[in-house]
């Protein structure tokens, strides 16, 4: 978990301001601010969400700079108490709300500093997500760049060899490059594709929503401000002060789960229940000038949560399972009990075999 992750990093002195006091908006003020947020969301055409460790604390994963954060306690010579692992942690209300909002086409992209893998395991599509600091469940080929989403945590950190080899089939045979983890150490360069896409989406956005992040780490913490160049607005939801509070158009001091739950209620959107780790490689929605990501997933990662889609009059319940193609490492999406309207509007990771029941 985040404690073990932190202990695996190289020594580093400049970890930002830790242990700043938390503040809470009173109930009436909070209600008014959530109404304002709802109005901003309804009026926006391209929304990008920026997430930090604060969205995973209710899953039992400590943050870093909060009152009981990893770095905060480290400064005091203390060690956080924890009983949960990355593999046993479950996505929070916020994670699942973001899944629902993306499926409905309300939010368009998420930029995350988190390495806990909960965005992907919640079912958030990989091609709508930039993970700027890596993912504990992802390996990457050091030769062709293909990424593999795993069910279990990878055994290494800091871009080291994991012991595996790339099995991607190419025109001249199997790649056979060496697999490395994607977790960054201090001062490591951010992943080029994820960073470039995050910057592009932020510049394109007219609303940036920052959830559970102090925005102290650069360049990640400065990306939300790019929306200002598009005359967009910035919303910050965090209990502690952040680096860019004065530049925010709306500042909310509350638990992110409370805010996201209320936002979805105001928008008439149901938050799906988490029913186990999943891997959704591609969004139902298409963005302009979009490049396909070189990514696949363990076949036993199952998209098994039931999610209501109000695409037209009826809701659609979809259950997806990733299966292997014969003689190929590329996964195939097998759709069960899937409405035809969803298939016509959706995009799959590869050409699917469709079976109607």
Image (cartoon, rainbow, N blue to C red):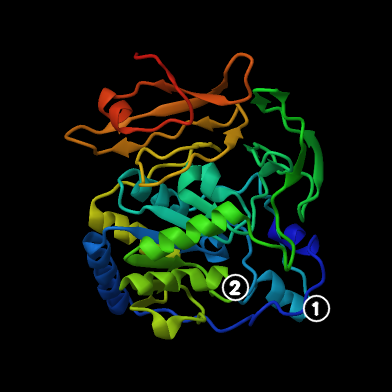
Which residue is pictured at 35% across the width and 47% down the height? 288
Residue 195 lies, in percent from the top left, at 55, 59
Q: Secondary structure at mark 1?
A: loop
Of the image marks 2 and 1, the number of the one nearer the N terminus = 1
Work out which quarter of the rendered image holds the N terminus and state it. bottom right
Q: Secondary structure at mark 2?
A: loop
Using the image, determine if residue 144 lies above or below residue 186.
above
Query: Which of the pair 66/166 is nearer the observer?
Result: 166
Residue 196 lies, in percent from the top left, at 52, 58
Please identify the quarter of the rendering in which residue 328 is found: top right
The residue to which callout 2 is attached is 218
The residue to which callout 1 is attached is 77
Specify whether residue 52 is in view.
yes
Disc 2 crowd, CA 10 A, few/some/many (<14, 14-19, 20+): few
Work out which quarter of the rendered image holds the C terminus and state it. top left
Which residue is pictured at 33% across the width and 70% down the height? 230
Which residue is pictured at 58% across the width and 38% down the height? 294
């Amino acid at each position: 978990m985040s404690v073990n992750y932190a202990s695996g990093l190289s020594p580093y002195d400049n970890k930002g301001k830790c242990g700043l006091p938390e503040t809470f908006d009173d109930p009436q003020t909070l209600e008014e601010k959530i109404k304002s947020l709802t109005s901003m969301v309804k009026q926006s055409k391209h929304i990008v969400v920026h997430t930090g460790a604060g969205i995973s604390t209710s899953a039992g994963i400590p943050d870093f700079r909060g009152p009981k954060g990893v770095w905060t306690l480290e400064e005091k010579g203390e060690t956080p108490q924890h009983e949960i692992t990355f593999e046993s942690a479950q996505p929070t209300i916020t994670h699942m709300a973001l899944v629902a909002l993306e499926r409905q086409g309300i939010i368009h992209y998420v930029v995350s500093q988190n390495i806990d893998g909960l965005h992907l395991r919640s079912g958030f599509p990989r091609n709508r997500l930039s993970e700027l600091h890596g993912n504990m469940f992802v390996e990457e080929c050091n030769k062709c760049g293909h990424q593999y989403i795993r069910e279990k945590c990878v055994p290494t950190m800091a871009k080291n060899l994991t012991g595996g080899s790339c099995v991607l089939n190419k025109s001249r045979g199997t790649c056979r490059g060496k697999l490395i983890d994607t977790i960054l150490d201090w001062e490591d360069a951010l992943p080029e594709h994820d960073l470039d896409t995050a910057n592009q989406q932020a510049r394109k956005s007219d609303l940036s929503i920052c959830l559970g992040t102090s925005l102290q780490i650069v360049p990640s913490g400065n990306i939300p401000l790019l929306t200002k160049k598009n005359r967009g607005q910035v919303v910050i939801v965090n209990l502690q002060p952040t680096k860019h509070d004065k530049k925010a158009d709306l500042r909310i001091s509350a638990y992110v789960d409370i805010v996201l739950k209320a936002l979805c209620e105001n928008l008439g959107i149901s938050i799906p229940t988490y029913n186990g780790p999943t891997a959704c490689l591609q969004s139902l929605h298409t963005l302009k000038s979009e490049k396909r990501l070189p990514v696949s997933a363990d076949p036993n990662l199952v998209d098994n949560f039931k999610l209501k889609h109000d695409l037209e009059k009826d809701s659609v319940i979809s259950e997806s399972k990733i299966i292997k193609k014969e003689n190929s490492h590329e996964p195939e999406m097998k759709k069960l009990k899937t409405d035809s309207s969803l298939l016509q509007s959706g995009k799959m990771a590869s050409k699917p075999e469709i079976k109607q029941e």
